[in-house]
Structures are given as C-alpha cells and as structure tokens.
Image (tube, grey):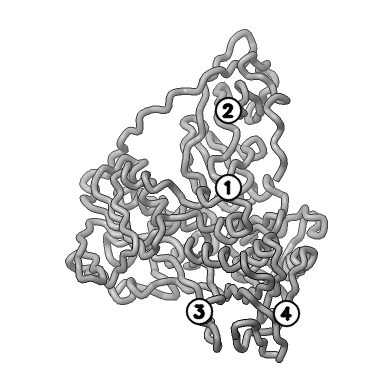
C-alpha cells in the first residue's frame, strides 16, 4: 500500500487541467480545496469521484478502471463512476460525485453533485415479498439488508441474530482492532441508529429453534413463530472447540465475535505470554496482533509449514519467517495435549508458559437449522446459481452456502468475508425476483504486521505453482494452476496485477 500524496501537491481541479493530461481510459488524481478527487475519462465522458474507497480508504487512483467502474486496489471493492454507488462489496457506501465542466480545452471540477434521491427499483412483477426474514447477523445478513433497502424495498425486514452486538466488521477483530491500532467505533458495520432509521427490525440474542418450511414460519427458542415470504439463512460458521483437558479454563479463548475479541484484549492486558493454537490465517493474524501488543507469542500447529495447503510451500516459508522476524516462536508438527492455569503441555512433552491461550483451529458451518428443515446439504447448504436452496423462497449465503462455481465447474463453499458480503447482496436482488446468478470470483485478504496478502480465486488443488517477482523482497504474484488453467492468484504488493487476475477470471 502506498502513501497518498498530500492534497497541496496535486493539481487544483477548480483552476482546471488541460484535457490533454487525461487520456482515454486514463486516471488523474487532483484536488478541490483540500479534498482529493479522481478524474477518469471514458471516451468523451469525464467522471470526477472521491479518490478513496469508502471501505478502508484505499487509493482509487491506483486501482483498475473497468468499463464505467473503478475497482479498489486493496480489497477489490467496485464503484460506479456515473453514480458513485458501491456496486460490489466490501465497500457499501457510495463515493462523492463531482460536477465536471469542459471549456476551452480544459477540465474544471468545483462542486460536488447533489446525490439523487434514492428511487425504488421495482422487483420483477408479482415477485415483491411482503416480509423478509434473515437468520444471522454477520457479513451476508448485513449486506443483504443494506442492499434490500438500497434497492428500494419498503416492506418488513426482520434480522435475527444470536449475537449480543449488531453486525461488525469481523476482519478487524483479528487485525487492527485486536492489535490496538483501531478504535472500537470502527468495528460496527453501521451505528445502531442505522437499523431504526431504515426500519430494519434487528433482534439480538435471538435463538432460532427451527424452520417450518410448509407454513413459512421461523420458530424461535421461546416458541414464538415468525412468518416470512422470503427467508435468508446466513448463520455463518462457529469455531471448532478444543477437546483437551483445560479447554474450558477462563484464559482459553476462541475468536469469532466482538465479545470474544473484547475478552482477548482484556486478558492480553494482564498477560505476558500467549499461546496460539493453529497456524491458519486467523491464528497468525491473532499472533501478529498480540505481538503488536507486546506479548511473547508461541504458535502451535500440527502442520510442518504454515498455510502450505492454501498458499504453497514458498509463501508458507515466507510467512513463518516474517512472524519469526517479529519474535513469534513456532512449534510445528505438534498439538496441545492439555492446558492448566499457567501452561500448555504439547503432545511431544514440551510445556509452554501461557497467561492467555487462543484456539484458532478452524471453523465449521452452522448448518443444523437447514438440515433439520429438510433442505439439501452436503458439507454446507446446497444452493443453485441464484443462491436459492432446495426449498423455494429460502436462500442461503455466506459460510454455509455451497454453490455451483462456474470457474471451477464444481460446487464450492468458501469461508471469506467478501464472498459472504457479495452473496448477501446477490440474495437481496434475487429475493426481489431478479434471478441473478452469483458469479463473483472469490477474494480475501490477510494482514500480517505491515504485509498484506491478497488472494483471488479458489484452488483446492493445483499441479503447477508459478511465481512472478520475488517473495523475499515482498513483491510477488503466485499463480496456482491446474491442467494449465489458473485457479487462483496470491500476491504481495502487486495490487494492479491482482485486480487484472480477477478480471481475467471473470472473463474465463
């Protein structure tokens, strides 16, 4: 990620720039007052939009223009250049659009355009549901309710979440917030007022006991029954629990919710030594965050190389070395045998002192509701290309959904935040009768200290790994191929290449 230019160093668009400075398809970063504005030219059209992604403030001038859209280089959000609308998660809020004047061979930008009134976009005739119920308060559920209201749906929306907090930006829980680099007010997806302002009935601590498919009712644990015309199951995944003596001790934690993260932070403040069980993305992000907080951190995992199954041996070795540079101590090829109040005993007989233990040994999809309702399942909830389950009117999205992926030709289930958000957006459109296939290329990112790793696509297996650039110098792109076809791409500081790889997979 590059450092943005200061606004004072940029061309003053209010004073105008020569049209010759902006080629067709080109971008130009300028300013209006102290605000950075991005100019994009498409033929005779010139667009002026806010220069930073509304997700994590990524520099759109370093992104990729595709048609009348621009994609963020950091986390692949996508914006409509004509309207500023965030058309693809993880960004949900629009960009500011500015009025453009062309005169005497120059381009002038002086005032933001007044956002148009949000107009209801009618659903397919006869398809508008009277009540939509969403089970789950995570990425998919939130993206669905936000999109439903953005599309102009005016009827009842009820969101049932068994969490104690409104939907949060879960990636932050293992990254900046856990590390102490982000305040808690960055964590909620929207302030609590958002739900009341948009007439969304958010029920926290709501435990759903079952789904009565024939009568179209959700049955709550207290016996109450809630009718629905369309139902979205977005129940997500839950951490795999440790099954060793001492796993229930108060200093042993998993990380999934805001409450989990708060508990880890509170314990970390009184701890000196932490043991992280698991060398997954979550486990190693937790390790990095705890090191940032100054704790001694040991990572215990059964594999011989971190994340080799997903990223390959070369990037796995790099990630291990990166963490070791920051003081993390690895115990690979090992498992926890038992935990007591002061230490973790491994299956090789070693003991590790631990004031804090965090288990990141995987998650499992929460499919019990779907299974008990008689929906088709197979290592997840089976859905069609439009994310509808085997029961008409019931959709599934996020960590539980196994959908037919047109790139691999297989049914896949992906536990990624951005995938869950994009699926939530697609189900919103399809609950309104759009019949839109979900065909977004999977994307996720992981952050280790100051090193981001972007991953596009889905490669459960590969027979060729091609490396471009140099992993050691943190400037690389890795292509995972099977039978000569690129299935996925991982990259470090190759943002535009990552976006281009995503675009190529979309067109394949």
User: What's the distance in space between the residues labelled 4 and 2, CA to CA?
Assistant: 54 Å
User: What's the distance in space between the residues labelled 1 and 4, CA to CA?
Assistant: 35 Å
Camera sees residue 460: yes
Mark 3 / mark 2, whichever is N-terminal: 2
Say which residue appears at 50% left-offset and 79% top-offset: 241
Query: What is the residue that sits farthest to the top in this orientation?
Result: 104
Say which residue appears at 32% left-offset and 41% top-offset: 197
Read off the residue under disc 4: 331
The kind of secondary structure element at disc 3 is: loop
The kind of secondary structure element at disc 1 is: loop
The kind of secondary structure element at disc 2 is: strand
Relative side of 439 to 484, left or right: left
CB under 8 Å between discs 4 and 3:
no
Mark 4 / mark 3, whichever is N-terminal: 3
Residue 76 against residue 59 in the figure, above or below: below
The kind of secondary structure element at disc 4 is: strand
Which residue is more in the foreground, 483 or 410? 410
CB under 8 Å between discs 4 and 2:
no
Between marks 3 and 1 in the image, the one whose residue lies nearer the viewer: 3
Mark 1 / mark 2, whichever is N-terminal: 2
Read off the residue under disc 3: 241
Between marks 3 and 2 in the image, the one whose residue lies nearer the viewer: 3
Read off the residue under disc 2: 42
Mark 1 / mark 4, whichever is N-terminal: 1
Graded by Cα atoms within 10 Å as few (under 14), some (14 to 19) or many (20 or more), the crowding at tag 2 reads some
Between marks 1 and 4 in the image, the one whose residue lies nearer the viewer: 4
CB under 8 Å between discs 3 and 1:
no
Mark linked to residue 133: none
Read off the residue under disc 1: 76
User: What's the distance in space between the residues labelled 3 and 1, CA to CA?
Assistant: 33 Å
């Amino acid at each position: 990620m590059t450092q943005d230019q200061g606004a004072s160093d940029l061309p003053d668009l209010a004073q105008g720039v020569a049209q010759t400075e902006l080629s067709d398809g080109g971008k130009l970063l300028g300013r209006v007052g102290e605000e950075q504005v991005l100019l994009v030219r498409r033929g005779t059209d010139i667009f002026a939009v806010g220069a930073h992604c509304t997700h994590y403030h990524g520099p759109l001038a370093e992104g990729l223009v595709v048609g009348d859209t621009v994609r963020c280089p950091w986390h692949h959000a996508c914006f409509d250049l004509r309207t500023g609308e965030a058309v693809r998660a993880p960004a949900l809020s629009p960009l500011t659009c500015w009025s453009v004047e062309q005169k005497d061979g120059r381009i002038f930008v002086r005032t933001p355009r007044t956002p148009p009134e949000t107009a209801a976009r009618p659903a397919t005739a006869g398809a508008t549901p009277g009540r939509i119920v969403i089970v789950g308060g995570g990425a998919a559920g939130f993206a669905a309710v936000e999109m439903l209201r953005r599309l102009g749906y005016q009827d009842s929306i009820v969101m049932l979440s068994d969490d104690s907090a409104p939907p949060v930006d879960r990636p932050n829980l293992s990254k900046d917030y856990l590390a102490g680099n982000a305040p808690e007010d960055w964590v909620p997806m929207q302030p609590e007022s958002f739900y009341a302002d948009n007439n969304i009935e958010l029920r926290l601590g709501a435990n759903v006991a079952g789904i009565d498919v024939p009568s179209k009712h959700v049955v709550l644990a207290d016996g109450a029954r809630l009718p629905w015309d369309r139902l979205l199951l977005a129940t997500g995944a839950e951490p795999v629990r440790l099954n060793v003596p001492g796993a229930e001790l108060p200093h042993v934690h998993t990380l999934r919710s805001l409450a989990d993260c708060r508990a880890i932070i509170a314990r970390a403040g009184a701890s000196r030594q932490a043991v992280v069980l698991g060398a997954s993305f979550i486990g190693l992000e937790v390790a990095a965050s705890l090191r940032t907080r100054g704790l001694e951190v040991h990572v215990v995992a059964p594999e011989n190389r971190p994340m080799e199954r997903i990223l390959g041996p070369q990037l796995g070795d790099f990630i291990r070395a990166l963490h070791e540079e920051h003081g993390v101590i690895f115990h690979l090829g090992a498992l926890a045998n038992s935990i007591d109040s002061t230490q973790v005993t491994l299956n090789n007989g070693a003991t590790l002192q631990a004031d804090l233990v965090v288990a990141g040994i995987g998650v499992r999809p929460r499919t019990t509701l779907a299974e008990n309702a008689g929906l088709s399942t197979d290592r997840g909830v089976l859905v069609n290309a439009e994310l509808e389950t085997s029961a008409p009117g019931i959709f599934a999205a996020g960590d539980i959904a196994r959908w037919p992926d047109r790139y691999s030709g297989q049914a896949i289930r992906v536990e990624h935040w951005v995938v869950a958000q994009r699926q939530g957006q697609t189900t919103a459109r399809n609950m309104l009768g759009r019949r839109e296939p979900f065909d977004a290329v999977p994307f996720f990112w992981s952050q280790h200290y100051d090193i981001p790793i972007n991953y596009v696509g889905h490669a459960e297996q590969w027979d060729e790994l091609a490396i471009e650039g140099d992993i050691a110098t943190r400037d690389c792109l890795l292509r995972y191929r099977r039978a000569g076809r690129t299935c996925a791409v991982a990259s470090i500081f190759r943002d535009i290449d990552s976006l281009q790889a995503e675009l190529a997979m979309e067109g394949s």
